[in-house]
Amino acid sequence: MATISKFEELDVWQKARDLAKRVYSLTKEGSFAKDFALRDQINRSSGSAMDNIAEGFGREGKQEFIQFLAIAKGSVEETRSQIHRAFDRSHIGENEYQELLKEAEEVGRKLHNFIDYLKNSDHKGNKYNKK
């Protein structure tokens, strides 16, 4: 695996960012914009996924990174649940609903695979490297 020097280089962070941008765009429109509680909650949870990936990366230790990736995965699952509520409240149509679920599931899968990869890696993290 190539050396990653910035969290922005992580594919999983990029996908989480795309999801957060898509959610934000949808929540600015129509009835979704007026459902303040759900709008704010889904924006927070989708943003939390990308933020926790970044924070975990910045901790520079494998175990801490895994912990933050798990938190990010939880935020993605929360976002998926909120996507269902948005659809149930008719804030989004069937196509948007299916596309958002697919996108969120992809981010969740990537997080799961990345966590598994790190658990099986011998690398302990940059903070343990001798300087």
Image: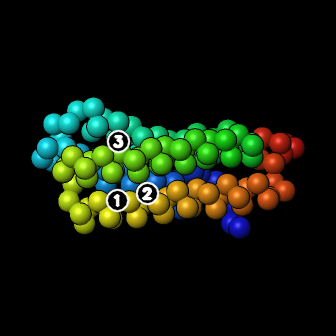
Q: Secondary structure at mark 2?
A: helix
Q: Is 56 on the left or on the right of 38, as rendered?
A: right
Q: CA distance from mark 3 to mark 2?
A: 12 Å
Asked if residue 99 is positioned above or below residue 40 in the image, the reply reads: below
Which callout, 3 or 2, points at the residue further toward the start of the chain? 3
Residue furthest to the right in view is 130
Mark 3, residue position? 42
* Res 123 quadrant in image: bottom right
Pointer 3 with pointer 2, Cβ within 8 A: no
Percent position (x, y) of residue 106?
48, 63
- Residue 17 lies, with reference to residue 36, above or below; the image says below
Disc number placed over residue 104 in the picture, else none: 2
The location of residue 11, given as percent across then percent down, is: 53, 62
User: Considering the image in quadrants, where does the C terminus appear?
Assistant: top right
Question: In the image shown, does 130 or 55 lie closer to the viewer?
Answer: 55
Q: Residue drawn at (40%, 64%), measured in percent from left and top?
A: 102
From the image, tell me which residue sits under label 1: 100
**Real-space Cα distance between discs 1 and 3?**
12 Å
Label 1 packing within 10 angstroms: few (<14), some (14-19), many (20+): many
Q: Amino acid at mark 3?
A: Ile
Calculate the distance from the C-alpha at mark 1 to the C-alpha at mark 2.
Answer: 6 Å
- Mark 1 or mark 3: whose residue is earlier in sequence: 3
User: How many tags in the picture?
Assistant: 3
Q: Residue furthest left?
A: 30
Rendered location of residue 127, percent (x, y): 78, 41
Q: Residue at x 21, y 54 (%)?
A: 92
Q: Mark 3: which secondary structure?
A: helix
| Residue 78 appears in the figure | yes
For badge 2, the amino acid type reads Ala
Q: Are marks 1 and 2 in contact (CB under 8 Å)?
A: yes
Q: Is residue 70 left or right of residue 102?
A: right
Question: Between 84 and 126, which is closer to the camera in this rendering?
Answer: 84
